[in-house]
Image (cartoon, rainbow, N blue to C red):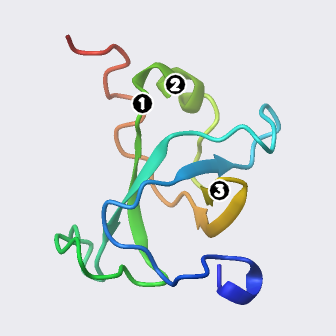
């Protein structure tokens, strides 16, 4: 989302940006945010390794569910085409769309001790 659309005021974030996530689903509320964090990719689909450089304003990110206990919840709700938002508190910083699901259904749901 651009600054004019209500997005970030300070421009694109850097890699390792920790933001909350909300996605459109009839089974949860507008204020119910999730710890699903982005890992931004470059134009070739490679992980951006430089933590000092701002990421592109538009592109692709792998999204990681931070709380493994929430994985079953998201497995029932996230599908290709789901629209979501990177949220800074109650502010929508960026609009997203799920284009692929990789690992959500197969990754472990239990914490490793």
Separation of residues labelled 3 and 1 (CA atoms): 19 Å
Q: From what the image shows, is residue 43 above or below residue 88? A: below
Residue on which the image places disc 3? 84
Circle 3 sits in a helix, a strand or a loop, which is it? strand
In terms of sequence position, does the residue under pointer 3 or pointer 1 come before the other?
3
Residue at horizontal 54 percent and vertical 57 percent from the top: 98
Nearest the camera: 49 or 80?
A: 49
Nearest the camera: 109 or 35?
A: 35
Question: Which mark identifies residue 70?
Answer: 2
Residue on which the image places disc 1? 105
Residue at horizontal 28 percent and vertical 78 percent from the top: 42
For the C terminus, the quadrant is top left
Q: Residue 104 at x, y = what percent? A: 41, 35
Question: Which mark identifies residue 87?
Answer: none
* Residue 62 placement, left or right of 69: left
Circle 1 sits in a helix, a strand or a loop, which is it? loop
Separation of residues labelled 2 and 3 (CA atoms): 17 Å
Q: Residue 88 at x, y = what percent? A: 60, 58
Nearest the camera: 89 or 104?
A: 89
Marks 2/3 in contact by CB < 8 Å: the verdict is no
Q: Residue 48 at x, y = what percent? A: 22, 72
């Amino acid at each position: 989302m651009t600054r004019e659309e209500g997005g970030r005021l300070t421009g694109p974030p850097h890699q390792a940006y920790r933001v909350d996530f909300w996605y459109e689903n009839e089974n949860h509320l507008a204020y119910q945010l999730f710890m699903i964090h982005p890992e931004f990719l470059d134009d070739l689909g490679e992980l951006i390794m430089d933590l000092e450089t701002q990421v592109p304003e538009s592109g692709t990110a792998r999204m990681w569910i931070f709380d493994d206990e929430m994985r079953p919840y998201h497995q029932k709700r996230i599908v290709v085409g789901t629209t979501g938002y990177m949220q800074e508190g109650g502010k929508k910083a960026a609009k997203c769309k799920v284009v692929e699901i990789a690992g959500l259904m197969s990754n472990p749901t239990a914490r490793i001790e």
